[in-house]
Amino acid sequence: MNWPYRFSPNGVNSASKPACDCCPPGAGSHLHLDTSRVKHTADLYIAIMSASVEYNGTTGTADAGYSTHADDLNVFYDTGHMTFIVISSVLVLLMIPGVGFFYSGLARRKSALQLVLLSMLSVAVIGFQWFFWGYSLTFSRTGNAFLGDLSQFGLMKTLAQPNGGADTPDILFCLYQGMFAAITPALAIGAVADRGRMLPAVVFMFVWSTIVYDPIAYWTWNANGWLMKLPSYDFAGGGPVHVASGACALAYSLMLGKRSGYTTTQGLPYRPHSVTNVLLGTVFLWVGWFGFNGGSALAMNIRAIMACYVTHLAASCAGITWVLLDYRLERKWSTIGFCSGAISGLVAITPAAGFVPSWAAVIIGVVGAICCNFATKLKFLIGVDDALDIFAVHGIGGMVGNILTGIFGASYIANLDGSSHAPIGWIEGNWIQLGYQLAGTCAAFGWSFGLSCIILFLMNLVPGLSLRVSAADEDVGIDDAQLGEFAYDYVELKRNFNDAGLATGDDSASSSTEKVATAV
């Protein structure tokens, strides 16, 4: 539509060069409604409600937005879109303690608090890293095909120029994507459960985000990135978030070694200490995922709504599928199984959310849950003690989602935001897309796993940054040895396991001694 208004930037409507006949000389930047072009009342309503104009400043290089000569930079953006992205940012932030509660509930009591704390430390550490250079390395406009530059170091020249889309000013896009950067190491760092030291984990978050996450996110979402140009489609982070964090968790588990008492056939036989925490974490994650996937449309439009719907549908189908898979073995309706299934469905739909129709979300949820469920046995085959099955759920789930995007991706879904896409997946006859999706998946896994192993190996050589606690501290518990605080007032004095998972009376290497807090 040819909107019945025009924009007069600051300084243009001057005494020497007036731009509006109806406005006084020296008037500042403003929207001017040309009533002669309003044909109907509906046109007037739309014009008023859509009172934003196309950004007319410098593009292609870092610019705060003042090149527009506007004294009110808000005129370029719709407050409805900006509100939606701010709310989505808050929802993604709430997912991070959800990760902490989920992991804490799966772990033992003596390490429960550590996992919640690490998830929140990820918010703080990456919050600074993203400001310092993470955002510039990931979303600067003048990088090469592999990595961005430091043209926006310290968020200089980062304010009102559009980034990511025409509806998101730079600073808003920075806020939203910063939450993605923060949750990714939080997902991976659960690998330290029961045996990892705090300081190396915190240092690792900063280094890993810089060397691993930022490049993968740049390849995937920056207009100059090689995966974006291929194109390898990833709507909300199947590769940068889930495959990368899953591969990182696998590497961290490998470099830490097995927990005391771990066996190659049954792992470490204990039950999750708090199913309630697992369920609470699942609720946080499920609700937050509406901002994670829906917000990735970067505007309040039908594509965003569709992304929210398929996210919910895939999680629902995956939760049911996992419960049934567990029921066939134990004839029990497992709460842990439902929560794990729902998360696997949310992971699998993440790269596909803005590309697939609703019927495909059912398939993605079911297939994602089946693959992740069986992938929990991989740790026994490869001999890696992935305590919380992070690789099985996030690594494998992200891979499944990436691949199925290449099959079920549809341009008519992607076009719901008003853009125009060529045929995407196999259902539209674009057979080569599956190869592109595999390329993105393998690149994310290979880069994350390889670099994570190297970073951890080198850190372990640095005095003071050894990755693992002592055997005595592991037996006492990480909360006591590393934090000096406890998740609960009452915890069990002792719980011993033999290889069969039965209580014994001796203090073997498989025992787990936990401190009792004084009852108040």
Image (tube, helix red, strand yellow):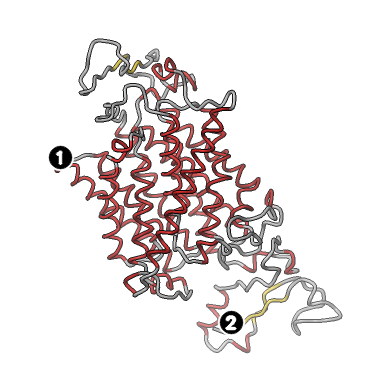
Residue 252 is situated, as x and y percent measured from the top left of the image, at 45, 35
Q: Which of label 1 and label 2 is nearer to you?
A: 1
Q: CA distance from mark 1 to mark 2?
A: 63 Å
Residue 99 is situated, as x and y percent measured from the top left of the image, at 41, 40
Query: Which quarter shows the C terminus?
Result: top left
Q: Amino acid at mark 2?
A: Trp
Rendered view: 302 above or below 325: below
Decide: few, some or many residues near mark 2? Use Cα within 10 Å; few <14, some 14-19, many ≥20. some
CB contact under 8 Å: marks 1 and 2: no
Query: Which dot marks residue 329?
Result: 1
User: In the image shown, does 213 or 70 lie closer to the viewer?
Assistant: 213
Left or right: residue 481 versus residue 7 is left
Query: Which dot marks residue 407?
Result: none
Residue 293 is situated, as x and y percent measured from the top left of the image, at 43, 57
Residue at the (67%, 75%) spot, across then down: 31
Q: Quadrant of residue 38?
A: bottom right
Residue 205 is situated, as x and y percent measured from the top left of the image, at 54, 38
Q: Residue furthest top?
A: 506
User: In the image shown, does 311 or 371 lie closer to the viewer?
Assistant: 371
Give the residue pinned by disc 2: 3
Residue at the (33%, 67%) spot, across then down: 357
Rendered view: 320 above or below 111: below
Q: Residue furthest right?
A: 16
Q: Secondary structure at mark 2?
A: loop
Badge 1 or badge 2: first in the primary sequence: 2
Q: Amino acid at mark 1?
A: Leu
